[in-house]
Amino acid sequence: MIRRPLQHALDELRFGRSGTLNLRASLPTAAEAVKRAESWLRMKQAEGAREVLIVTGRGNHSFARVPVVREAVQRLLAYLSTRGVVEQHSEHSPGSFAVRLLPMTAAVEVIVAAESETARARIVGPEDSLLRQPRPITVEFLVHRDREANAAVIEGFGASTVPFDAFDKAFKRDLGFEASIGVRLVTQAQCPAIKFLSQIGGNQARAPRINLNSVEVRNGETLSGTIENFANRVVELLLVSDAGEVQSLSYLLKPGIDSLSFSIGMQRNGAGEGPQLVMAVATPQVLDSLRRPKPMAADSFFLQALSEAQRNNVAITTAARYFRLKN
């Protein structure tokens, strides 16, 4: 058995002083510990750290010797493993956790609370802050992101530009520079697909990537593209029309070297033009709800997909790309 002074020396050698968060020293409440741990983990991820140590203690000083801080931090680590922060974690000792962090692929993470009246945007990085602006509409939207130095390129989906105008002002106010925001206007009927993206989003490092050959397609033409970054997972290809109908087109996927390709013959019955969404959903096993033989309304389709995934404890990652279909 390794004595405590030797264990401490080995931990410092492995994780370093800056790579260790000692919650035990200040005896925080469970809520305080979770807040400190999440902020610290996101900061370490932004700094590029890959392995860190969180010391929680065993709970010897807690009421009835129940390790409430340790249990709260353990739940936090499980949650952050679904949000693109924690790659894996394990018990390092009865009073500490070794945590492996995912590399940060996008520093600006926008979190959407679709049911609330507030659009919440968290800037993940050295200037971590929470932006809040009133949202006068209740439609859902999601923002994808990328960032280099003092530049942010944000692609958003929404049924209105109003939430993005508010977000743009808050972004500049809190960070001191303007974001380049491209708003992709969708229909109200497509909003359940955007809500699905916001509910599933988080681990962008594992999300599939969709490449389209065009963002404008005329009636009767073919939309071609590829899907990458799916590893050994099952990939489902979905098309969400401006009428809010979801079609499963997975049968069109053709395997290639490290990618899947597809070609979709586009047909539009109505006049004018309409926004369309191509979605790729990656899962470790087949979900029957994602392979409907007939088109289904988006609200029912994505609700059933989420329900099946939760029942079977199946992790989902997804991505979407926008294009317009013209007559």
Image (spheres, rainbow, N blue to C red):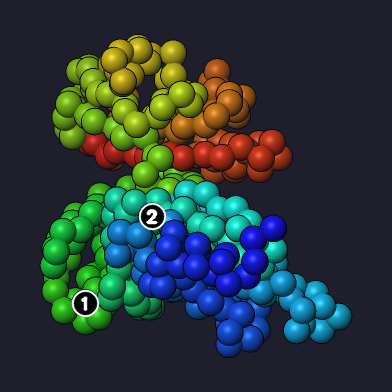
Say above or below: 165 vs 262.
below
- The circle on residue 175 is 1
Horizontal placement of 134 versus 267: left or right? Answer: right
Q: Give the distance between the C-alpha atoms of the residues marked 2 and 1, in whole angstroms.
A: 26 Å
| Residue 279 image point, x, y percent | 38, 34
| Residue 162 image point, x, y percent | 29, 67
The quadrant of the image that shows the N terminus is: bottom right
Question: SS class of the residue under badge 2?
Answer: loop
- Please state which amino acid type lies under the numbered disc 1: Leu
Query: For the point 31% across and 28% down, which residue is it?
Result: 228
Is residue 186 among what the camera can see? yes
- Please state which amino acid type lies under the numbered disc 2: Arg
* Viewer-nearest of discs 2 and 1: 2
Is residue 188 among what the camera can see? no
The quadrant of the image that shows the C terminus is: top left
Which residue, given by chain and number where applicable, does mark 2 sit on? Answer: 50
Query: For the point 25% across and 80% down, which residue is it?
Result: 174
Query: For the point 61% across and 65% down, which residue is it?
Result: 96
Query: For the point 80% across and 74% down, which residue is it?
Result: 66
Identify which residue, 215 or 139, lies in the foreground.
215
Which comes sooner in the sequence, label 2 or label 1? 2
Question: SS class of the residue under badge 1?
Answer: helix
Identify which residue, 302 or 236, lies in the foreground.
236
Say above or below: 61 vs 243.
below
| Residue 253 image point, x, y percent | 37, 15
Instruction: Sort mark 1 into few (<14), some (14-19) or many (20+) by Cα contacts within 10 Å.
Output: some
